[in-house]
Image (cartoon, coloured by chain):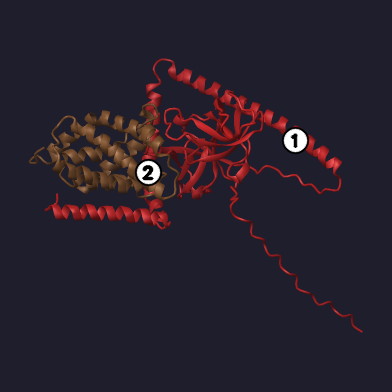
Amino acid sequence: MYSSPRNRNAVVLILVVLALLLLILFQTGQLQPLIDLALGWFQPLLGGAVGMSARARDVTGSLGDVAAMRARINELQTQLDELSNSRVRIRELESENTLLRQQLGYKQSNPDFDLVGAAVLERAPDLAHVIGQDPSNLVRYIIVDQGSAEGVKPGMPVVTPQGLVGRVTATGAHWAKVLLITDPSSSVNAVVQSTRATGIVQGESGNLATNNLVIKYVPQGEAIKTGDLILSSGMGGSFPKRLVIGQVSEVRKHDIELFQEATIKPAVDFTRLESVLILKKFTPSDITQEPTPTPTPIPKPTRTPTPAQ
Amino acid sequence: MTLWLLVPFLALAAIVQTAWLPLLSVFGYKVDLALVLVVLWGLVGPIGQAAQWGFIVGIFLDLTSGLPFGLHTLALTVIGFLVGWSQTTFFRGNIITPPATLMAATLSYDVLILAFLSLFGWRIVWQDYLLRVTLPTAILNAVVAPLAYFPLQWLQRRLYPRMEL
């Protein structure tokens, strides 16, 4: 292969320098067009491979009446998901109703205040197919077949009918990389549905076997118990309110600590993600940036015509 | 192996790792096929080629990964070089060598990636990652080593019949 050890070492050195160069160019954002081009070429192969694996799974499942049973199970699962979502919505509406009644009472008792109501942002979900998972066991990303050409932007939340999946971190023309909420570097502001206690949901570092989540920074005084439903709180502006995250499976409380934490079983089955929805009309807000005041144009004084004398 | 054959072969390996191996995961852990191929080719192939394999397959992995682009490429090139270098230094004909090398290589590979992520400001809980991700992955990679070792040995004999193992 190489004529001498010196040549061999030179080639390896060049490859290492090239790899470092790629890393630096990526960090400075100059590699994006090249990645987009390469992934545009690679994506159909990936999509084809995922399609083949899905078909292979279907073939192996078609022994006897297994396929029919699977269809029935899927149908029932869909109904169950819809019912669960309806239950969540009803409970949320009850809470909202109570809150609005309180606010109405507040407004009536404070007639001098000028109060304006605000509505939840419109959501327009778009279906995206999962075309691959991160090749490494260290991080949890998926890659989907919708990108900037379809209006997908970094920061957009990604969901399934079961609940929250993650958020878009990078996009190309027809692909997007999604950081799953099960990754330890992901954080979601959350609320316990029954008690409205707030906390932050993160992926459990290193726990690949269960894909569990952890809700942290729940104050000691707040009630949280096994079976409680955890929803996104909408605080921080990264995710919309009321997206189902999961259900509490274990609570850890130590008297000597300021906060309690709990393990959450996610509502979404991350091992079987085939398609997801991207909330395109939800615009994440960056709360670290102060809003810049828009200058109001000073109206030019208009010369009033002097009446003819 | 010429680049015309090597590039599609390694692209296929990256596709298998990204699209198919997640379906065959064991307790959530998937085999790091690219690393397995690079390390084992470092043991059976001509000296210096494993780094080349690592560079090519690394680029394909970086395309599909959420990690900073170039990290897989860098880590696999370095690992490929180290394994290639070790084959000239240590005895490689032992049956224990492939799984043992893969265990050590998986550990080095993950440590290298985590160190760079840490450098880029990612919050890394080293103990959790090393004990709960790297160690099980290293064991899994070592277990599958014989499945890839013998086909690669066969490939080496076909491509380089005059090379001694």
Say which quadrant the C terminus of chain B sits in: top left
- Position of residue A25 relative to residue B17, above or below, is below
Q: Colour of chain B?
A: brown
- For residue B114, which quarter of the picture? top left
Say which quadrant the N terminus of chain B sits in: top left
* Residue displayed at 26% across by 41% down: B9
Viewer-nearest of discs 1 and 2 = 2
Return the residue at label 2: B114
Residue A150, x across and y down, in percent: 51, 47
Q: Are marks 1 and 2 in contact (CB under 8 Å)?
A: no
Q: Nearer the viewer, residue A218 or B71?
A: A218
Residue A252, x across and y down, in percent: 54, 27
Note the chain letter of the red one: A
- For residue B94, which quarter of the picture? top left
Return the residue at label 1: A99
Report helix, strand or loop for mark 1: helix
Q: Residue furthest left?
A: B162
In the picture, the disc for residue A134 is: none
Residue B34, x across and y down, in percent: 29, 39
Q: Amino acid under label 1?
A: Leu
Residue A163, x across and y down, in percent: 56, 32
Residue B139 in view of the camera: yes
Residue A52 in view of the camera: no
Q: Residue furthest front?
A: A256
Whether callout 1 and callout 2 share a subunit is answered no
Q: Is residue A158 left or right of residue A86?
A: left
- Position of residue A273 relative to residue A309, above or below, is above
Q: Is residue B149 left or right of residue A75?
A: left
Q: Residues within 10 Å of mark 2 (few under 14, many from 20)?
A: many
Q: Nearer the viewer, residue A15 or A172?
A: A15
Q: Amino acid under label 2?
A: Leu
